[in-house]
Image: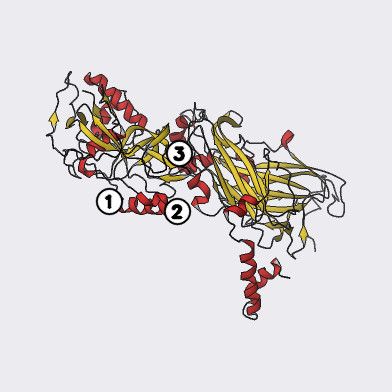
Amino acid sequence: MFTRRAALMGGAMIAASPYIAKNISVAQAATTPTATAEEIAALPRRKQKLIAPPFVHEHEQVATTGPTVVQFEMTIIEKEVQIADDVYLQAMTYNGSMPGPMMVVHEGDYVELTLYNPPENLLQHNIDFHAATGALGGGGLTLVNPGEKTVLRFKATRPGTFVYHCAPGGPMIPWHVVSGMSGALMVLPRDGLKDHEDKPVSYDRIFYIGENDFYIPKDEDGEYMRFEDPGEAYSDTLEVMNGLIPSHVTFNGKVGALTGDGALKAEQGEKVLFVHSQANRDSRPHLIGGHGDLVWELGKFNNAPDRDLETWFIRGGSAGAALYEFLQPGVYAYVNHNLIEAVNLGATAHVVVGGTWDNDLMEQVVAPTEYDVAHEGRTALP
Amino acid sequence: MGPRFFILGAGAIVLIAAATFGAITLTSNNGAIDAPELVRIPAGQYSHRPAGDFRAGTRVVDAPLEYYTAQNDLQIMKHHVRQSEYSACVADGGCKVTLTQGSDTLPQVDVSYLDAIAYASWLSEKTNQTWRLPTDAEWVRAAGDRFKEVILGDISNDPDPSKRWLKKYREEAQERGAIDPALRPTGSFGANNLGVVDIWGNVWEWTQSCFLNGKVSDDGVTLIESTSYCGVRSVQGKHRAFIIGFVRDAKSGGCAAGTPPDNLGFRLVRES
């Protein structure tokens, strides 16, 4: 039986065994057969409703059926959104949230998206799926004016977490992205996720962390500017964007959105999959007090996960995934470990974890107490 | 009032009259503003493909060729609006500040559609005349022998969408050539057969025509219906581009996979 692990090791084995090399090409070809229009039409179809981040619609981790056409709908909403205290953005959104909702399918499924641009919007929009092949990720086939809709179908051929974003041409591309138009698609292997030893792993919860960098202009008095519509905001925003220094970096579209009442919740012993997407700018997620047990830093499940990471890197324009089992109760901070961005610009989420403290993992041996400055601490330990 | 257009029967072949009219200079009413030099484009028959995206079923096709008769001559600026002219509007409070050196000879670029119509309304007020952006069809009339359109023709019938896309990209890249986007004095790119200068240069021009999404008959000949989207206007030059109305510089980002205009400027028509 050919396994993914064999594929991973294939590079080393090819020289020794042409048979293996041949098997690899057969296996790869088998995963992406070209279906005819009749075959696609004969596939089962399923409508999947999307839900707002940081949550993800219900889905099977291991597919129990064959390839399916999974139908999604998204409506583009242009609206003013408060992204911090007294700071407002003329946002452009998929389904009204920043990031846009996450979609989950399995490798070999077809994603069929109906994209609506309601007549009350001002601008043209489209969608570029990093998971899709051809036509600028679908961007070339999905440009919709206000009042129009379009339907795009593409085959999910590569398992992994992928960004999608708006890319309506020229200088509109970066502006739409930093106005909120990005999200993530996860293509799971049909037989689910595998660890570094190719053994099945699963998650009890999934948290979808969409990171946005915002570039809000300031007026002559140093106050953040507020605009009537996106067009009015364009030129001032462009000036800030071209300086490459964001005014805000947020998780879930607003400074503090995933803290306090919005904090994420988990239980000790639960395995949580964090999917982190950033459509525009590099980030470096870190779970303060925890780790990444298995991390697909690049987000692509055909690559074996890294283990025991402290911080992982999300390249701008990609989504990565990290699996972690919470071992201690308490409050964890999930941050972009450029700490200026985490603390001063907003890139912090909290995870509140219930359970029973494990003194074996950590114990406070001496609580902070005054010490005798004359006699203690003058020499290092022997 | 503007010229009135009539759709003639499709299929007629119309040759655009190539008569050259001398440029005429007009005197302004109040003397404060030098009236721009105008070129008169004669009334008569012409053909035009509407500006936008057109589909027969799901296939993207060329815009259908339509035939019109203009009842009136068209009076259009010989040159692009120059920096000194635009600066006068800014100084007078009629136009928004943009990048300019105030030059007497260089065209004003870095202007949006909104900037261009603000200038037209300011100039109208100053001259007691009616100035406006040309429609896409009027621009095509004025472009005379310098007008060339990317017609993809039979390739529209290919169900493979990449064929048309690749051909369009190649043709636009070829036509755009290796021109330096640096501004040159108006007139540097020469006059067309009608006496209009710099049609074939590195300044693309705003028109007032909105982007159209149209359905065409299966044979590609007849426009069945269309809807217009005015957030985007047709911009004309070496090829037609569609630019959001508040954008001043379309070259910075480049189209994701297209050829962007080098510079955005404009010229106006005067209502007779």
Q: Which residue is mark 3?
A: A238
**Is A74 left or right of B45, judged from the image as shown?**
right
Disc 2 residue type (three-letter): Ser
Which chain hosts label 2?
B
**Chain at tag 1:** B
Give the image location of residue B25, x and y in percent. Answer: 13, 28
Q: CA distance from mark 1 to mark 2?
A: 27 Å
Q: Amino acid at mark 1?
A: Ile
Contact, mark 1 vs mark 2 (Cβ under 8 Å): no
Q: Are marks 1 and 3 in contact (CB under 8 Å)?
A: no
Give the Cα separation between the discs numbered 1 and 3: 27 Å
Judge depth for marks 1 and 3 and give the one in front: 1
Q: Secondary structure at mark 3?
A: helix
Q: Position of residue A204 (x, y in %)?
A: 79, 49
Q: Quadrant of the C terminus of chain A?
A: bottom right
A290 w.r.t. A306: above or below: above
Chain identifier of the residue bearing label 3 in the image: A
Which residue in the protein does label 1 denote?
Answer: B179
Q: Is residue B201 left or right of residue A305?
A: left
Residue shown at the point (87%, 52%) measured from the top left? A359
**Would you call the spot at circle 2 few (<14 residues within 10 Å), some (14-19), or many (20 or more)?**
few
Q: Which quadrant is the N terminus of chain A positioned in?
A: bottom right
Q: Which residue is mark 2?
A: B162
State the image quarter where residue A310 is shown. bottom right
Residues tagged by mark 1 and mark 3 found on one chain of the structure: no
